[in-house]
Amino acid sequence: DVKVTQSSRYLVKRTGEKVFLECVQDMDHENMFWYRQDPGLGLRLIYFSYDVKMKEKGDIPEGYSVSREKKERFSLILESASTNQTSMYLCASCLSANRGDTQYFGPGTRLTVL
Amino acid sequence: GESVGLHLPTLSVQEGDNSIINCAYSNSASDYFIWYKQESGKGPQFIIDIRSNMDKRQGQRVTVLLNKTVKHLSLQIAATQPGDSAVYFCAENIDPRRSGGSYIPTFGRGTSLIVHP
């Protein structure tokens, strides 16, 4: 079974703090994704990566950056957290985004920015 | 169906009934579709997928129907159980040969299924 893990289930941070959300997958998947999920807005893509050290902006990249130094790990960074970044953050991976493979999701990190 | 505004559409059924959850997709170039189930406090889980060269696919207790003419997808759950209570959403994927990039899914907003014992 594919396993996607996220470093924290719940996180509380203060405005202006730098926040790191970590995601690890154990199935040698090429592609990894970061989404945020908000009530009524569904899943929105922040960034994705199709290879080590490669990244592409999603629909809402502003205020975020990412890092993919190793194939199994994809980090989401909030450079200076703001209250409007309070959300559920979901990481996903898939084997190859070039042939429509299923995305597998982690359990999510619920981030609250005070 | 898919939600508008802040509230998810909700489908309430009795245990043992069949459930049908609908999804309208937007892009006629989409050729791969997935249904996900998300239970409270958890990440989305894959249920079933279908490619555009098919109009029906069956799994265990679930069936997905695809109508490309009207860009509509449905998920049918047979003999719904309380454990099926969750938010269900569809994802559409566009063939990268037509989109110029990788398969990046677009997710619907979801439908909340409530199963009453």
Image: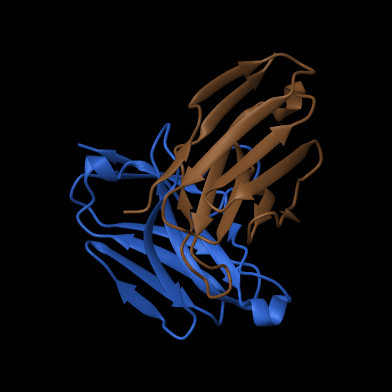
Chain colours: A brown, B blue
A80 relative position to B19: left or right? right
B46 relative position to A68: left or right? left
Question: Front-most of B59 and A93?
Answer: A93
Residue B13, above or below B26: above
Q: Residue at x 50, y 31 (%)?
A: A7
The count of marks equals 0
Look at the image and tell me in which quarter the C terminus of chain A lies.
Answer: top right
At which x and y percent is residue B46? 39, 56
A63 relative position to B39: left or right? right
Residue A6, above or below A83: below
The answer to which quarter of the image holds residue B97 is bottom right
Look at the image and tell me in which quarter the N terminus of chain A lies.
Answer: bottom left
The answer to which quarter of the image holds residue B116 is top left
Residue B5, above or below B28: above
Q: Residue at x 61, y 77 (%)?
A: B95
At which x and y percent is residue B49? 41, 68
At which x and y percent is residue A55? 72, 55
Which residue appears farthest toward the bottom when viewing the image? Answer: B53
Q: Residue at x 60, y 25 (%)?
A: A111
Note whether residue B13 is visible.
yes
Q: Residue at x 65, y 56 (%)?
A: A49
Note whether residue A40 is visible.
no
Residue B78, above or below A24: below
At which x and y percent is residue B13? 30, 45
